[in-house]
Image (cartoon, rainbow, N blue to C red):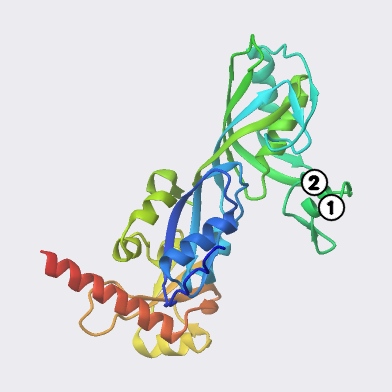
């Protein structure tokens, strides 16, 4: 009989951890494991990676979950391998082989097809995906043996680099690097390119190497996290503000910061801006340009709140920053 897992005393944790998601783990499984290791009260991921995929999976903790949508909407970069001549029921290596074809593809053929799949293209979401129809994920219909109608969606392939490998034998493959917009299914892209080449294809490997400015070189593996001490894990966290790196910055004085946190619009000589990161003054004695209050947009000189941090969240983040500063000073 398996012993029950000991209860973990949860705590407020705020920040972003860049995980290199391991193969065969779902995004939620990886999230729950890291949440348990961090003893965090609140956590969420920033978009699903298939179990077949590895690579950058930003995990948001505490206050960072308020801005996770920004990563969902971000552009992505993938490295992928498609097996040519083999079609599967899921368009990837997890499905059953449904057709095998002869591969007769030249570099000229590939160059022509790459042009067709660069820019704005239409994609029909695969049945084996988490996209919902009538309240149910498409994969639930697929598991029941049902195929439902799906509308094609427009996505953008900003850059597609592709190269043929082992083209003269049974392991013919297509190596791809894809920079794309949100909502792009690389499985579907591989399958569609295979059809355009006349031989069919299915995805055999997928690695997300960049999302929203975060690169896989910045990530930590799950195995390494497990081997760390509690303090070392906390030191892996990036500040919440890292999710807002491309936002216009507005810093308010103490009086206006308090009103902004109450949801009140502020007026100022600011140009219009769609995405604004708003900061207030740091607590007395703490260095830094300011403490994050939330996000906003500016229209006609008005700073309009969008997502706000709570005073307890701000207090905890300031306390964590002060603790880190004292630790660094002590070590020096």
The residue positioned 50% from the left and 60% from the top of the image is: 33
Classify mark 2: helix, strand or loop.
loop
State the image coordinates of residue 18 (x, y, percent, origin top left).
44, 54
Instruction: Return the mark for residue 141.
Output: 1
The residue positioned 70% from the left and 30% from the top of the image is: 202
Q: Is residue 219 visible?
A: no
The residue positioned 28% from the left and 83% from the top of the image is: 283
292, above or below 2, in the image: below
State the image coordinates of residue 28 (x, y, percent, origin top left).
59, 59
- Quarter of the view holding residue 118: top right
- Quarter of the view holding residue 184: top right
88, above or below 185, in the image: above
Q: Quadrant of the C terminus?
A: bottom left
72, above or below 173, in the image: below
Disc 1 to disc 2, how far (Cα)? 8 Å
Q: Earlier in the sequence, mark 1 or mark 2?
A: 2
- Quarter of the view holding residue 106: top right
Q: Is residue 79 visible?
A: yes
**How many numbered discs, if any?**
2
Instruction: Return the mark for residue 190.
Output: none
Instruction: Return the mark for residue 127.
Output: 2
Q: Which of the two discs, 1 and 2, sits closer to the camera? A: 1
């Amino acid at each position: 009989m398996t012993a029950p897992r000991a209860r973990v005393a949860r705590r407020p944790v705020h920040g972003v951890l860049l995980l290199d998601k391991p193969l065969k783990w779902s995004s939620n499984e990886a999230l729950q494991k890291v949440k348990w290791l961090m003893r965090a009260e609140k956590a969420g991921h920033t978009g699903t990676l298939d179990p077949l995929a590895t690579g950058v999976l930003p995990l948001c903790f505490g206050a960072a979950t308020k801005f996770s949508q920004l990563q969902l909407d971000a552009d992505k970069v993938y490295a992928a391998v498609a097996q040519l001549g083999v079609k599967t029921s899921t368009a990837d290596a997890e499905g059953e082989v449904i057709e095998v074809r002869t591969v007769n593809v030249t570099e000229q053929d590939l160059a022509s097809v790459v042009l067709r799949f660069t820019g704005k293209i239409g994609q029909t979401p695969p049945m084996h995906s988490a996209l919902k129809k009538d309240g149910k994920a498409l994969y639930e219909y697929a598991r029941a043996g049902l195929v439902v109608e799906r509308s094609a969606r427009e996505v953008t392939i900003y850059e597609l680099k592709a190269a043929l490998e082992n083209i003269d034998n049974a392991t013919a493959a297509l190596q791809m690097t894809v920079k794309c917009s949100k909502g792009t299914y690389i499985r579907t892209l591989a399958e569609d390119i295979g059809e355009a080449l006349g031989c069919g294809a299915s995805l055999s490997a997928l690695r997300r190497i960049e999302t929203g400015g975060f690169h896989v070189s910045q990530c930590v593996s799950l195995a390494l996290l497990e081997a760390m001490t509690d303090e070392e894990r906390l030191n892996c966290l990036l500040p919440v503000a890292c999710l807002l790196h491309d936002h216009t910055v507005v810093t308010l004085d103490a009086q206006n910061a308090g009103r902004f946190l109450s949801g009140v619009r502020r007026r100022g000589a600011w140009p219009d801006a769609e995405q604004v990161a708003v900061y207030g003054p740091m607590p007395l004695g703490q260095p830094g340009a300011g403490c994050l209050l939330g996000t906003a947009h500016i229209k006609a000189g008005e700073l309009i709140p969008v997502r706000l941090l709570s005073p307890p969240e701000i207090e905890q983040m300031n306390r964590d920053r002060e603790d880190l500063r004292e630790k660094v000073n002590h070590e020096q």
